[in-house]
Amino acid sequence: MPTLRIAQDPAADELLGRDPLALLLGMLFDQQFPMERAFAGPRLLADRMGVDTLSAADIADADPEQLAAWFQGPPAVHRYPGSMAARAQAVCRLLVERHDGRAESLWSDAPDGATLLRRIGGLPGFGAQKAKILVALLGKQYGVTPPGWREAAGEYGAEGAARSVADVTGPESLAAVRRFKQEAKQAAKQAAGQRAGTAATS
């Protein structure tokens, strides 16, 4: 079982390491929300559901209002608890329909990185970037290394990178990834400003 230190909370990280669905949902929650809180979300959800391991079938079959209430807390599982509860339920319903409710079946028999990326990218709420980051996280920390996984993960698969949650192994690397994201955001803002200035003078 992999030892993860993404949530910076022993109980939350322990669940991520042994429950593939928890890892998948943590990745889903990692959007417009602090990374470590996103990945602590599955533990909060499991505690409120009164379970030790999350079940895709249980979440898929849950009453939407009850599921939303579990997400709302306090503390909230996500910044947007209602919409994220609905998205998590959509992911779990797809897992039940296509993968026998087993998140790990997305990668357990993936013949190559391209197939793995395609499967993850087909999940509700998983755009191209999020799918690549999860492929990188699975390869770097979860032992899921089908041929071509680094290529499928793109820049997130690079060894020694500090770009995403795939590279977080403790407080220091979390800080490094956060710095990278802030610098990237700042650079994008400056580039947008330069484009706007060029457009105004042309």
Image: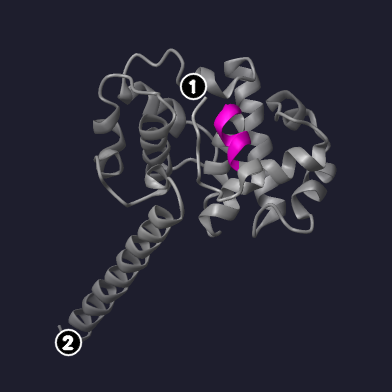
Q: In this view, does 94 lie to the left or right of 154?
A: right
Where, by quadrant of the figure, is residue 115 drawn?
A: top left
Q: Does the magenta run of residues contain 16?
A: yes
Q: Mark on residue 88?
A: none
Element assignment for label 1: helix
Please state the extent of the stretch shown in magenta in the rendering: 13-20
When asked about the image quadrant of residue 136, the answer is top left
Q: Is residue 6 above or below residue 19?
A: below
User: Real-space Cα distance between discs 1 and 2?
Assistant: 50 Å
Under circle 2, the secondary element is helix
Q: Nearer the viewer, residue 175 or 117?
A: 175
Q: Residue at x 58, y 35 (%)?
A: 16
Q: Which quadrant of the structure image shows residue 72?
A: bottom right
Image quadrant in which the C terminus is located: bottom left
- For badge 2, the amino acid type reads Thr
Residue 65 highlighted magenta (yes or no): no
Q: Which residue is drawn at 59% across and 27% down?
A: 18
Q: Mark 2 points at which residue?
A: 201
183 left or right of 25? left
Looking at the rendered structure, the kind of residue marked 1 is Leu
Question: Residue 83's spot in the image, x, y percent?
Answer: 67, 51
Foreground residue, 116 or 37? 37
Q: Percent x, y for residue 189?
A: 32, 73
Q: Which residue is label 1 attached to?
A: 106
Give the mark toward the camera: 1 or 2: 1
In percent of width and height, residue 190 lies at 27, 76
Crowding near the residue tagged with mark 2, few <14, some 14–19, many ≥20 C-alpha atoms within 10 Å: few
Taking the view exactly as shown, the residue that stands out farthest to the bottom is 201
Judged left or right of residue 74, residue 92 is: left
